[in-house]
Structures are given as structure tokens and as C-alpha cells.
């Protein structure tokens, strides 16, 4: 009986520490300073808080492939600890942003040009999809697999998307599964197919960008 009680105490301790971990992981960690300056930056003024990397974005006209311009911690160090970031997405007619997840952030997508079909799948494997018009906003809950698709044959689409983390992270499902060296046999058994099919899928995918 005594050992039973001990086990239960240990168990509830584990549960509560896990709950605390979940709490601290609910967003980027809180920072104890107004902002975080990288060690190699000595002179902080308004410029440090300004990102100018998108000025040229559409100067040369829209691209012919899916164009993802990130403004996250890596591109804009002033975001460190601030729990926000952006990406600007350009979708030529007929392109898709393949199913992917952001492990660290909710995503809030704002269609500023064209229309987009979007969707996400929850942990019960239910699909929630929608066709968005210019001006619509759609939320992709944190960590869930989602996609966007410009189904139009001759209309470019552009979306501005915000993340609740300075470093949302991305798993692109096709790349995560087929360009990371997971054995063909494992994939063939997982997809209930043969290794030739897996090889064909692998051949069609470029290695992920670092
Ligand atoms: C600080 O270091 C980062 C990463 O190496 C670099 O990208 C950035 O340009 C540096 N900033 C300055 C002001 O030297
Ligand atoms: C949702 O997806 C289904 C196909 O799975 C499609 O038939 C339907 O038109 C989509 N709905 C919207 C609102 O885009």
C-alpha cells in the first residue's frame, strides 16, 4: 500500500511537471529584458528593429514557382524572444504549398491577392478546408498539418502569413518523408506499396533547403 501511494505521488509529480513543460512551451520563452541584442551587435538604434529585405520582393514581377520569403529569427534577429514572425508567399497559378506543419507556432494567413484553397487536418484526421477570397484570413492551429493551393489557371495569389513564434519551424511532409534518407523498405511498408513506388516519389523531390 505504501509503495502504491509512493507510485501515485511520483505519477502525479510527473504529470504536473509535464503540464508545466507544456505551459512554458505554449509560446516562445518569455524574456527578462525588453529585447534581445545579439552579442556581435554593439550599436542599437531603429535600424536594428527594421527589416528591409522585402523591398525588392516583387520588383522583378512574380516568380514562376512557389515563392516563400521568410521574416523570422534567422532573417531578422530583433524578433528573438518576441513570439512573432512573418512569411510572404507568392503562388503562381496552379501551384501548391505542400502539406506541412510548424511545430512551434499557430499560423494566421491573410490572402492579399487572388484566391487560395487551404486546409488543415486535426489529430482525429478530420480535414477542415476552405476556399479563401482576397481579403480573407484563415488560422492554422499550432502544429497541425496544412496546405495551400492556388487552383486558378491564370491568376497569381499572394498571402501574408504571421506566426506566433519567432522561429516557427517547418516540416514539409514530402521532404520530411522522402528526402531525409528513411529506408525505402520502411516507407514502402508504411505506405503499403513497393520500393519502386517509393523510389519514384523520392526522385521527384529536390533535397530540402537547409
Ligand atoms: C552578427 O552575426 C550574424 C551571424 O553570424 C550576422 O548575420 C550579422 O550580420 C552580424 N551582425 C553584425 C552587425 O556584425
Ligand atoms: C474541400 O475539399 C473537398 C475535396 O476534399 C472539395 O470538394 C471542396 O470543394 C473543398 N471545399 C472548399 C470550401 O474548398
Image (tube, helix red, strand yellow):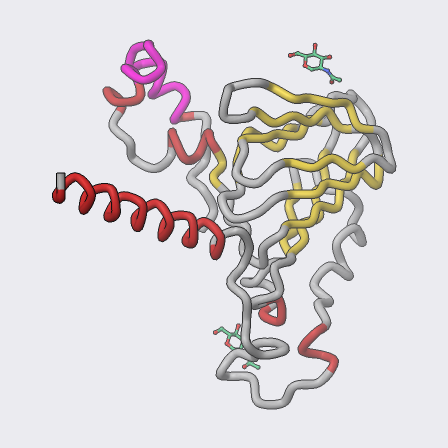
Going 41% across and 53% down the picture, which residue do you hit? 21
Of all residues, the one furthest to the front in this rendering is 1
Going 55% across and 54% down the picture, which residue do you hit? 27
Image vertical order of residue 27 relative to residue 97, above or below = below
Q: Quadrant of ligand 2?
A: top right
On the picture, is 204 further left or further right than 64? left
Image vertical order of residue 132 relative to residue 5, above or below = above
Residue range in magenta is: 188-202
Q: Position of residue 33 (x, y in %)?
A: 58, 79
Image vertical order of residue 112 relative to residue 21, above or below = above
Closer to the camera in the image, 38 or 25? 25
Q: Position of residue 20 (x, y in %)?
A: 43, 54
State the predominant SS element of the stretch in magenta: helix
Q: Is residue 208 magenta?
A: no
Closer to the camera in the image, 104 or 203? 104
Image vertical order of residue 55 relative to residue 12, above or below = below
Q: Is residue 197 magenta?
A: yes
Going 38% across and 26% down the picture, which residue do you hit? 202
Amino acid at each position: 500500500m505504501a509503495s502504491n501511494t509512493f507510485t501515485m505521488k511520483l505519477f502525479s509529480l510527473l504529470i504536473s511537471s509535464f503540464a508545466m513543460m507544456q505551459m512554458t512551451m505554449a509560446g516562445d520563452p518569455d524574456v527578462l529584458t525588453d529585447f534581445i541584442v545579439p552579442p556581435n551587435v554593439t550599436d542599437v538604434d531603429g535600424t536594428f528593429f527594421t527589416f528591409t529585405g522585402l523591398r525588392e520582393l516583387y520588383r522583378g514581377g512574380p516568380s514562376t514557382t512557389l515563392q516563400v520569403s521568410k521574416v523570422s529569427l534567422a532573417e531578422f534577429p530583433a524578433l528573438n524572444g518576441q513570439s512573432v514572425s512573418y512569411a510572404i508567399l507568392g503562388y503562381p497559378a496552379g501551384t501548391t504549398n505542400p502539406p506541412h506543419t510548424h511545430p512551434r507556432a499557430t499560423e494566421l494567413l491573410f490572402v492579399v491577392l487572388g484566391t487560395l484553397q487551404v486546409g488543415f487536418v486535426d489529430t482525429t484526421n478530420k480535414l477542415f478546408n476552405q476556399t479563401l477570397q482576397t481579403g480573407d484570413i484563415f488560422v492554422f492551429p499550432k502544429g497541425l498539418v496544412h496546405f495551400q493551393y492556388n487552383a486558378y489557371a491564370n491568376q497569381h495569389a499572394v498571402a501574408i502569413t504571421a506566426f506566433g513564434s519567432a522561429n516557427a519551424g517547418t516540416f514539409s511532409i514530402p521532404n520530411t518523408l522522402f528526402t531525409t534518407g528513411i529506408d525505402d523498405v520502411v516507407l514502402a511498408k508504411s505506405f503499403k506499396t513497393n520500393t519502386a513506388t517509393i523510389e519514384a516519389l523520392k526522385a521527384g523531390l529536390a533535397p530540402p533547403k537547409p
